[in-house]
Amino acid sequence: MAEATVNSSRPTDDGSVHGGLPTDRLLEAYRWMVLARVIDERALSLQRQGRIGFYAPLSGQEAAQVGAAFALRAEDWVFPAYRELAVALVRGAKLRSILDQLIGNSTDLANGTQMPNHFAFRDQNFVSASSPIGTQITHAVGAAMAAQRRHDPIVTISFFGDGATSTNDFHAGLNFAGVFQAPTVFFCQNNEWAISLPRKRQTVSRTLAQKAEAYGFPGVVVDGNDVNAVYLAVAQARRRAIGGEGPTLIEAQVYRFGPHSTSDDPHRYRTNEQVAAARERDPIHLLKARLMGTRALDEPGDQKIWEAARATLASAIEEAEKVPPIEPGTLFENVFARPTPRLETERAQCETFLEHGGEKK
Amino acid sequence: MTELTLVQAVNRGLQEAMRQDPDVLLLGEDIGVNGGVFRATEGLYKEFGAERVIDTPLSETGIVGAAIGMALYGLKPVAEIQFMDFIYPAFDQIVSELAKLRYRSGGQYPCHVVVRAPYGGGVKGGLYHSQSTEAFFCHTPGLKVVIPSTPADAKGLLLTAIHDEDPVMFFEPKRIYRSVSGEVPEGDHRVPFGEVRLVREGTDVSVFAYGAMIPPAVEAADSLARDGISAEVVDLRSLVPLDERAVVASVEKTGRAVVVHEAARFCGFGAELSAILAEQAFYSLKAPIARVTGYDTPFPYALENLYLPNAEKIEAAARSAVRAG
């Protein structure tokens, strides 16, 4: 049960768990990572221009997210936090749908209810994210228990950060998963910062993965900048869960390059030098070097990937911004399966207010 | 029909739902082998096994969080919180997650969990085995909140809750778990939400109550009747959604309202009920709306009978309303 470390093995062509991802899959991973990075950069400027209300960047965590998502199957269930944009992309969420949610327009699948980054994509088994920290961890365990009861050969996976390991739900979730041998994977992206609090002030545990030991199942530390290593760790944890061997806690060690969110100024609590040092191991640069080393990629090819990502994003933004704003009546939808008489009354009052020249949207 | 106590009726409601649908399962502390500290789940572990009557570790956030995950996946979990007083570790799960999942996902992820919890005083339970904090949950959009006061309603509302599509907080008046018994229909007996139960008709004053406050309200009405005052007793039983039309109609008829609950007065459910009456029945009122509630103190141990509303207090409030106009 001791904590283990997964090291990346050389990529091979067979795509097996032991060998890691074959070259074509690595190249595919690289495209997703670049797209996520491009979205991040563009979203920060969209927020500053007032075109979206908020943004929580994921720069530095692309390999961890794409690697984990690559190890999952479509029928598995993802319980994300609010930084898992790259996971959503790999799961098949449409870029347009992501933009719709960031804007909160009338085609937003979440009906304009949530601030940006709090995605829900039912078709991708990507469960609705919330802002409270760690609450999704127990949900993933409960869903895994349900899958177990129905004998469905699937796993659930919860995504959370280093800060979440201090929460009630982290403890409750891991404890329940151990007791009930739930087929679930706990995927912690330790990005060293919970807003301003450094990892070492979150807990004095030597690693976060070692916490699994207390719950009676393995904890694994993995280099979260290495997409292949992450893929291997999650694939192995998935195999254990499917095989009835119970849960695994994975600590993917990464670094949050950007601010916690567009409302945060990281200069108050960390230096540029620290960030620059972390950027030396930028997951995108590492994967690019690896692909160039095997001649799967060259500079012109790389340029094309970045340009294609920017072009795809630009047209998705253009489309999403053309969509009409959300209708006021949607305010009252989905509170309950069917509106209560009180909600019907309030909806009518709101309509009257608008008809009499009240606030226009 | 069978004569049952209220807690037995809860048990039969759970049993009926579990027999109807293999997706219904229970989770909570001491509910399996032990049958629940109030025996609400007695015999169910034996009938349905450890997979459907799940004894969990001691963690309310774990119980409700796991139940949410199960519900998202398609099961119909009924979570038991041993006492309402211990629900707060799960408050975040209930208020931030359970209540909001349907809304925040644009209807993609409805989440139907029933959370059962015994509540209320009169059992020498002191601070942490006596409270009535239903108002917290009534104040949270997305939750339905029901409280039975009879065995038939306990079973009927519980079956409706389990077959509903929305999250339901099902609070059980533990003080009358065994002291109240009555006829309960066999089989799939359901009582719809959003309808009051008219306990007795009257013309002079309306007494609104629920749960363990119904017996003292009826006792007060009996006493008032001896003096020729006709009190209508209305069991609200479904706090969300509330049968506002029936509440308003009752006061339009009687012109006087007494609102009763065990919880502290300030911002209690009675405050909302009073506001509804002030908004919708103002011109029918002949007297100020009266509230008979717990005091705005924590729930006491030695002085709980002084703290709790009783027939005497309800009667006094009704008489004073009748005298006023």
Image: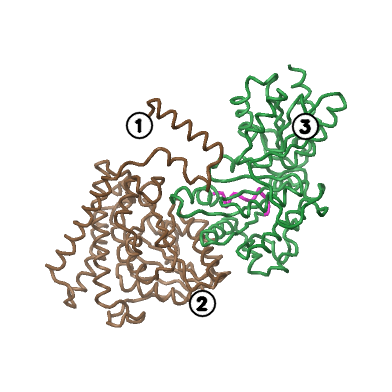
Chain colours: A brown, B green
**Residue that lies at the very extreme toward the left in this rendered image:** A300
Select label 1 or label 2 by which is in front.
1
Residue bearing the label numbered 2: A245
Relative side of A268 to A205, left or right: left
Judging from the image, mark 2 belongs to the subunit labelled A
- Amino acid beneath label 2: Glu
Q: How crowded is mark 3: few (under 14 residues within 10 Å), some or many (20 or more)?
A: some
**Residue that lies at the very extreme toward the right in this rendered image:** B226
How many angstroms separate mark 3 from mark 1 (CA)? 48 Å
How many angstroms separate mark 2 from mark 3 (CA)? 62 Å
Residue B288: give x, y in percent of width and height. 68, 21
Residue at 52 percent across and 65 percent down: it is: A174
How many angstroms separate mark 1 from mark 2 (CA)? 57 Å
Residue B150: give x, y in percent of width and height. 76, 46
- Above or below — where is A174 with respect to A270? below
Residue bearing the label numbered 1: A360
Q: Residues within 10 Å of mark 2 (few under 14, many from 20)?
A: some
Select label 2 or label 3 by which is in front.
3
Q: Quadrant of the N terminus of chain B?
A: bottom right
- Amino acid beneath label 1: Lys
Judging from the image, mark 3 belongs to the subunit labelled B
Magenta segment: B82-91
Q: In which quarter of the image is residue A352?
A: top left
Do badges 1 and 2 share one subunit?
Answer: yes
- Amino acid beneath label 3: Glu
Q: Is residue B86 magenta?
A: yes
Judging from the image, mark 1 belongs to the subunit labelled A
Q: Is mark 2 on a helix, strand or loop?
A: loop
Residue A90: give x, y in percent of width and height. 33, 64
What label does residue B201 carry, if any?
3
Q: In which quarter of the image is residue B224?
A: top right
